[in-house]
Image (tube, rainbow, N blue to C red):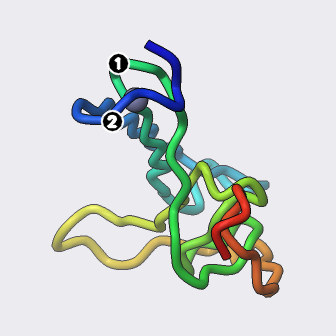
Amino acid sequence: MSKADCPHENFGVFAEVNRITDAQPLTAFAVDLTVRCADCQLEFEFLGDFPGGIHCETTTLSPDRARLSIPIKPRGQEWIGRYRGFSVHSKLPPSGGNA
Ligand SMILES: [Zn+2]
């Protein structure tokens, strides 16, 4: 079955939790999410208006819209994030020509 013929009925969600370090031992946490069709392996794109870059207080989106990076922290613990990072604001249309 080709990617064009696949009805995309099963999915794999990949979550990668990152411990972001800078000059300090630990400065922030973030979870990066990607989604693929489990049958044809086609990567999904996240829709919506998110900035690009890496930031400890703002959800960011990779330029190809395939990876969403969400800042997180341990529940009940004081916010330890000190890494501000950077974000790039632009309007990225979904790829594939459906915009
Ligand atoms: Zn598929």
The residue located at (60%, 49%) in the rendering is 66
Name which residue type carries label 2.
His
Check mark 1 vs ligand 1: CB closer than 8 Å? yes or no: yes
- Is 11 located above or below residue 41 in the figure? below
10 Å crowding of disc 1: few (<14), some (14-19), many (20+): some
Name which residue type carries label 1.
Asp
Q: Which residue is mark 1?
A: 39
* CA distance for labels 2 and 1: 7 Å
Q: Considering depth in this image, is 89 or 2 the residue closer to the camera?
A: 2
- Circles 2 and 1, Cβ within 8 Å, touching? The answer is yes
Q: Which residue is mark 2?
A: 8
Q: Residue furthest top?
A: 1
Which quadrant is the C terminus positioned in?
A: bottom right
Q: Considering depth in this image, is 14 or 97 the residue closer to the camera?
A: 97
Residue 94 disc label: none
Residue 47 percent location from the top left of the image:
52, 71
Question: Which corner quadrant of the figure contains ligand 1?
Answer: top left
Residue 88 percent location from the top left of the image:
82, 80
Q: Secondary structure at mark 2?
A: loop
The residue located at (78%, 60%) in the rendering is 63
